[in-house]
Image: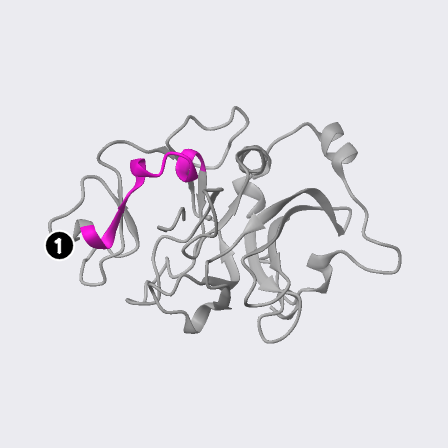
Amino acid sequence: MRLGAVVLASASLLVLAAVPAPPGRSPLPERMADTGGGSQLVTARASRTSSTTGTVTWWNRHGGRWVEAGSAPARFGARGLVEGGSREQGTNTTPTGLYDLPYAFGIERAPAGTTTPYRRVRQASWWCQDTASRSYNRWTEPRPADCRAAESEHLISYRAQYAHALVIGFNYARPVRGRGAGIFLHVDGPGATAGCVSVSKGAMRRILDWAEPARKPHIAIGTDSGPTSIVRY
């Protein structure tokens, strides 16, 4: 999205990186109604819907419980967060909800340990956001005639943000036109995003190195409380 804007270490390193939950409190994923059914999860959590910053944490399920594998500061949409089912395109809001992570992409090469399918961005790579196009909310090469450049992202133009990224499956499997397109987990730009979730380049590389498609990683985006609370999904 515009406005400047959305990992396999060895088993021993994962154990060393594990962070236990505070005493008397279960890990965040264990307080969620749904984690996507896999054994890996990313949580992107803000304090409230008006927040433009928060925390991204990635988790592994081991021995019947969730263990933190890493965490990093995160940025959200310039106008905060909104429930995904009611989001409107162009509002610069990050959609809350639980989503899959279909594939990764980047202008730079994938980190060495990446096992998630990874597409390299080329000069001809676009993400169509034109609601009138048959390619709405899809990667296209080249940009089709029915997808206006003014309503699309030329991916290679975002060299910092799209050095590495994961596609967030918001409005992706069966796109609803006008709900939003091009929601990613990507590298930080100069400020808040236009609806994506962003982290530092180092954190993004660690996430790509950690994620294993066979473990069905998902991302849960939400707030600390209220109807968008991450623990209510």
> Where does the magenta region start and end?
150-164
Judge from the rendering whether residue 169 lies leftward or rightward of residue 8; answer left or right.
Answer: left
Indicate yes or no whether the magenta region holds residue 63: no
Indicate yes or no whether the magenta region holds residue 162: yes
Q: Nearer the viewer, residue 17 or 150?
A: 150
Q: Nearer the viewer, residue 3 or 141?
A: 3
**Does 201 appear above or below 173?**
above
Figure quadrant of residue 49: bottom right
x and y percentages locating residue 70 in the rendered image: 68, 41
x and y percentages locating residue 73 in the rendered image: 62, 46
Label 1 amino acid?
Asp
- Of the 4 image quadrants, the one containing the C terminus is bottom right
Q: Secondary structure at mark 1?
A: loop
**Does 159 appear above or below 228?**
above
Q: Nearer the viewer, residue 61 or 18?
A: 18
The residue positioned farthest toward the top in the image shown:
112
x and y percentages locating residue 190 in the rendered image: 46, 43
Callout 1 environment at 10 Å: few (<14), some (14 to 19), or many (20+)?
A: some
Q: Is residue 118 visible?
A: no
Name the residue at 44% across, 40% down.
165
Q: Which residue is mark 1?
A: 146
Name the residue at 18% across, 63% down.
132
